[in-house]
C-alpha cells in the first residue's frame, strides 16, 4: 500500500477536497485534449477551447508580479519572516479570484516549473531542506515537470558538503480527484551523489488543490495548508 508523505515532495497530503467559483481568462494556441480518470470513474477532459473572461484583465497580472517579487530569491521561503509569509498568502488569496473555474482541465498546468516558494519551506525536500539538512546540502534548484497526459517529475538539485553535486528525483502518476484537486502517486525516490545513485524508500501519494494557473505561475494548496508558488521556466 502506498504511504502518504511530504518528506521529498512539492505537494502536501490531503484528505478532503473543496470547490470554488471564479472568473478566468481566455487561453489560445493549445490544441491538446487530455482526459483524466479518477478512482470514482469520473472523467475530466482538458480542452483549450474554453472561452472565458475577466472584468479587469490587468488585476491578475499585477498580482502575479507582486507575489513573484515577494518570493523570488528567498530560498523557497526560508528567508522570509512571518509577516512576509502573511503578505504572500494575502496576494495568493486575491489571485484565487481570477483562477479558471476548472483548473485541472486547463492545459497551462503542463510544463516545467521552478518551485520558488512554500509557506512551510522545509516541506519540499524533507530532511534535505530542514535546518540541519541545509547545513550540509545547499539547494540549487527545485523543479517540477508536469507532462501530458498524467506524469509528474520532481527534482531537487543541491551541492553536498560544499563540493559534491547531487539530486533527489521522483516520478509520479497524476490523477484528477475533481475539477480542482489532483493526487500524485510517486514511485520510490532516487538519490544521486556525483556518479553514485540509489533508489530508496517506497511509494508515496500526495494531494494538491490548484488555486491559480496562467502562463507565468501556478499556485497550489496542500491539504495541510501549505501554499506553493511555481514559476514557469
Image (spheres, rainbow, N blue to C red):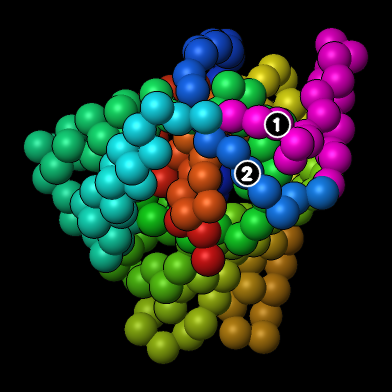
In the rendered image of this protein, does residue 146 appear above or below residue 88? below
Mark 1 — residue? 50
The magenta stretch spans residue 88 = no
Q: Nearer the viewer, residue 212 or 120?
A: 212
In the rendered image of this protein, does residue 170 appear above or below residue 159? above
Instruction: Tell me the quarter of the image containing the N terminus.
Output: top right
Mark 2 — residue? 27
Marks 2 and 1 close (CB-CB < 8 Å): yes
Q: Residue 198 falls in which quadrant of the image?
A: bottom right
At horizontal 45% and vertical 39% (from top left) the residue drawn is 219
**Which circle's residue, 2 or 1, is located before the other in the chain?**
2
At horizontal 86% and vertical 20% (from top left) the residue drawn is 43
In the rendered image of this protein, does residue 134 appear above or below residue 53? below
* Residue numbers of the magenta segment: 32-52
In the rendered image of this protein, does residue 200 appear above or below residue 19? below
Percent coordinates x, y for residue 134 in the rendering: 32, 63
Marks 2 and 1, how far apart at CA: 8 Å
Amino acid at each position: 500500500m502506498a504511504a502518504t508523505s511530504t518528506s521529498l515532495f512539492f505537494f502536501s497530503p490531503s484528505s478532503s477536497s473543496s470547490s470554488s467559483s471564479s472568473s478566468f481568462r481566455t487561453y489560445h494556441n493549445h490544441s491538446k485534449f487530455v482526459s483524466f480518470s479518477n478512482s470514482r470513474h469520473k472523467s475530466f477532459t482538458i480542452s483549450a477551447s474554453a472561452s472565458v473572461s475577466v472584468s479587469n484583465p490587468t488585476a491578475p497580472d499585477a498580482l502575479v508580479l507582486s507575489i513573484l517579487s515577494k518570493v523570488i530569491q528567498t530560498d523557497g521561503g526560508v528567508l522570509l519572516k512571518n509577516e512576509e509569509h502573511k503578505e504572500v498568502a494575502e496576494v495568493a488569496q486575491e489571485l484565487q479570484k481570477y483562477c479558471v473555474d476548472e483548473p485541472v482541465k486547463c492545459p497551462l498546468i503542463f510544463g516545467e516549473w521552478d518551485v520558488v516558494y512554500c509557506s512551510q519551506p522545509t516541506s519540499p525536500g524533507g530532511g534535505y531542506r530542514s535546518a540541519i539538512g541545509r547545513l550540509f546540502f545547499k539547494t540549487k534548484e527545485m523543479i517540477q515537470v508536469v507532462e501530458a497526459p498524467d506524469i509528474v517529475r520532481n527534482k531537487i538539485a543541491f551541492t553536498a558538503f560544499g563540493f559534491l553535486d547531487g539530486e533527489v528525483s521522483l516520478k509520479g502518476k497524476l490523477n484528477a480527484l475533481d475539477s480542482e484537486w489532483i493526487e500524485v502517486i510517486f514511485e520510490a525516490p532516487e538519490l544521486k551523489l556525483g556518479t553514485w545513485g540509489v533508489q530508496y524508500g517506497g511509494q508515496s501519494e500526495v494531494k494538491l488543490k490548484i488555486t491559480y494557473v496562467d502562463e507565468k505561475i501556478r499556485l497550489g494548496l496542500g491539504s495541510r495548508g501549505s501554499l506553493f508558488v511555481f514559476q514557469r521556466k
